[in-house]
Image: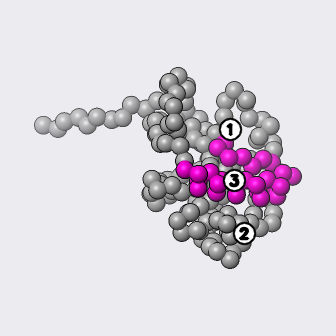
Amino acid sequence: MATATARPILITVAQYRDLPEKEDIIQELHWGQVVEWTQPKMRHVKIQSRLVRPLRPKAEHLGVVESEAPFRALPEFELRAADVAFITQQRWDAADDEDNLSGSPELVIEVLSRSNTNPEMKEKAALFLSTGAQEFWVVSPRKKTVTVISSQDTLVYSSGQKIPLTLFGGFLSVDEIFS
C-alpha cells in the first residue's frame, strides 16, 4: 500500500507579510516557503558597499543602484532582496511604495556566503533571468571572482580584469571589489 508523502505548505506574499518579524534573522519567501538566515558578516557588507559606490555614478543616467533591494520575482510566492541591484528609472518610479518591485531587477548581484551552494546559484540565475534580469552576478569573496551570467553566456572575471557594464556602459575592475 502506498503512503502519502507530506508536501510543504506554500504561503503567499500576503501571508508571509503577516508573519512576526524575528530579531537578527533575515527572512525571504522562496517558491512559497520561508527561508531564514542570520545577518551577514562585515566582509559581505563591505563587498556590497564596494559594488554600490562605483556602480551608482556609472548607472545614474539610467536608473538606481541599491543594496538589499526587495523584489517579487514571481507575484504570489516570491519575495527576495538582492545584495546589490540595478533598476531602471522607469521601473523604480513605477514601483508601488507599499509593495515591492515586480519582477527581478535588471541586474541582480549576489555576494556569496558560506551557506550558498552551486545548485542554489543556478536556480537563482534561472529564476531571475526569466523574470526580468538581464544579468546575474555571483561574487565569490573566497575565490575573488565575479561570474556574470546572462541569457547568452556565462563569463568569469578575476584579478586584473575589468567587467564590462553592458547595461549602462563602462567597466568595473574586479580588484576594486576585493581591495
Residue that carries the numbered disc 1 in the rendered image:
101
Q: Which mark is residue 153?
A: none
Q: Residue at x 66, y 34 (%)?
A: 100
Is residue 10 among the parts visible in the rendering?
yes
Q: Which mark is residue 49?
A: 3
Tag 2 secondary structure: strand
Q: Is residue 54 left or right of residue 70?
A: right
Q: Which numbered disc flags the more N-terminal residue, 3 or 1? A: 3
Secondary structure, magenta segment, majority class: helix
Q: Residues within 10 Å of mark 1 (few under 14, many from 20)?
A: many
Q: Which numbered disc flags the more N-terminal residue, 2 or 3? A: 3
Q: In front of the other: label 2 or label 1?
A: 2
Q: Is residue 165 magenta?
A: no
Q: In front of the other: label 2 or label 3?
A: 3
Amino acid carrying label 3: it is Ser
**Residue 125 x %, y %:** 56, 55
**Residue 104 x %, y %:** 64, 46
Tag 1 secondary structure: strand
Residue that carries the numbered disc 2 in the rendered image:
173
Amino acid carrying label 2: it is Ser
